[in-house]
Amino acid sequence: MRIAGAMLAVLTRAAMPQTKPGHDVDVVTVCEVLGNPAKYAQRPVAIVGRLESSVSLVDHYNYLSQDQCEHPVVTYEHVWSNRIQIETVWERGMPTPPQDRPRLDRGLIAAKSAEVHKTTVLGSHEEPLFRREGRSIIVAGRGEVPNSWALVYGRIAPVATLSKDCGASGCGGDDVPYGIIAKPYNVHELSEDGRLLPGAR
């Protein structure tokens, strides 16, 4: 599922200034964003949550998620999943992701990480398993891969059409209401105590 350009156009009508290095950046949880997406949609934001993946032989999608959000996204009686899709491949029509690598408050990251841990079980997801046979690599089934904690710095955008038809004819994709558009170097895995781990996912 790609973030549809037509649905993202609503966020590109006005110019969105880039955050300057060293400028204060909001560090928030997945639930905070989903509880008030309009507040965070017009500026870069750093989101802390559980990093989970949907992996098949063809597609690979990553999400930030959090359990037990008090104010999930609800449209016409449909309750959306508490997930935000991570999009690191920019396409025409999408809002531009922030280019900078801001210095984020480590204490705040740790605090938000601890907040997510209170409601969210890390868990795992399924991925295809491969093995080599001679010069070929073949599929050997599927196996459980642990999820991880993560922080993503980017720009919020709607993924699906949040309309009254949602639920009756499907909500599009994996029932994810919003995405975060980010540069790959601004996707970071976190340690259990909320420290940014070396390298970007």
Image (spheres, helix red, strand yellow):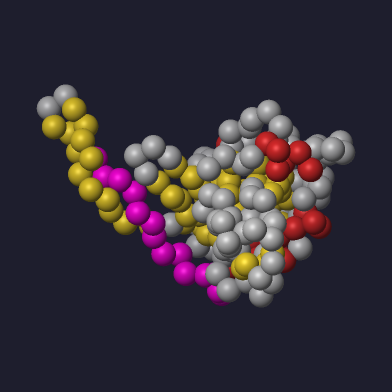
Residue 85 position (above or below residue 123) = above
Q: Is residue 124 magenta?
A: yes
Q: Looking at this view, is 49 or 38 the one in front? A: 38
Give the image location of residue 161, x and y in percent.
67, 51
Q: Is residue 52 magenta?
A: no
Q: Tell me the residue at 77%/50% (across/down).
A: 41
Q: Tell me the residue at 72%/41% (across/down).
A: 8
Image quadrant in which you'd find residue 58: top left
Give the image location of residue 52, x and y in percent.
47, 54
- Confirm whether residue 144 shows in the render: yes
| Left or right of 25 on screen, residue 178 | left
Extreme right residue here?
14
Extreme top residue here?
135
Q: Tell me the residue at 58%/46% (across/down).
A: 86
Extreme left residue here?
134
Q: Which residues are magenta?
A: 117-130
